[in-house]
Amino acid sequence: MSISSTLRKYFGNHLETGEDRLDESLKTRYYKAMKDKVFHTLEDLFQASSEFEINSLSKERGEMSVITKKGKKAFIVITVIMVSPNKTAVDFSVSLDSAIPLNFGYITKLINRLYDKLNKELPQL
């Protein structure tokens, strides 16, 4: 992992997952399920949690935005893309509502916690 990607984990108000991340914990995750199943699973996870509140849903575009209700205030955009039949990618984009650009790894931990919850519900590829 490069120095700049390590610094981004701890400094800054925004972080997102993707294919080209050097940090394995921030890489796109793939699930063996159809897009609608993954989207509904995410929707159920957020609705069942008292920590999050769904801000908006766009099933057609495969996007969902969520805000945190407890702890640090964060805005999360979840993108669900069907790559092939029975293979769906999930990415997170998290922005903290903070005047100081320090997150001390909070965003990375939040993303990993969300992926862990999703891994318990869906088979990962």
Image: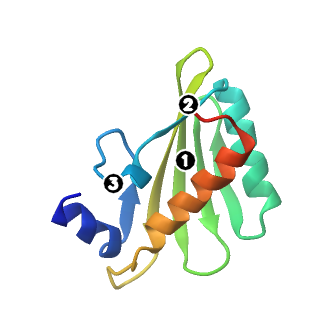
Given residues 83 and 60, the one toward you in this image is 83
Q: Is residue 88 above or below residue 100?
A: above
Residue plotted at (68% across, 37% down): 39
Disc number lying in front (3 or 1): 3
List the single residue furthest toward the top. 85
Instruction: Find residue 96 and name its label.
Output: none
Q: Secondary structure at mark 1?
A: strand
Q: Is residue 3 above or below residue 92?
A: below
Cα–Cα span, label 3 and label 2: 18 Å
Given residues 5 and 93, the one toward you in this image is 5
Q: How is the image coloured?
A: rainbow
Residue plotted at (61% across, 81% down): 71
Q: Secondary structure at mark 3?
A: loop
What residue is disc 2 on? 125
Find out whether the residues at labels 3 and 2 contact each other: C-beta distance under 8 Å: no
What residue is disc 3 on? 23
Name which residue type carries label 3: Asp
Given residues 18 and 23, the one toward you in this image is 23
Cα–Cα span, label 2 and label 1: 18 Å
Give the image location of residue 72, x and y in percent.
55, 80
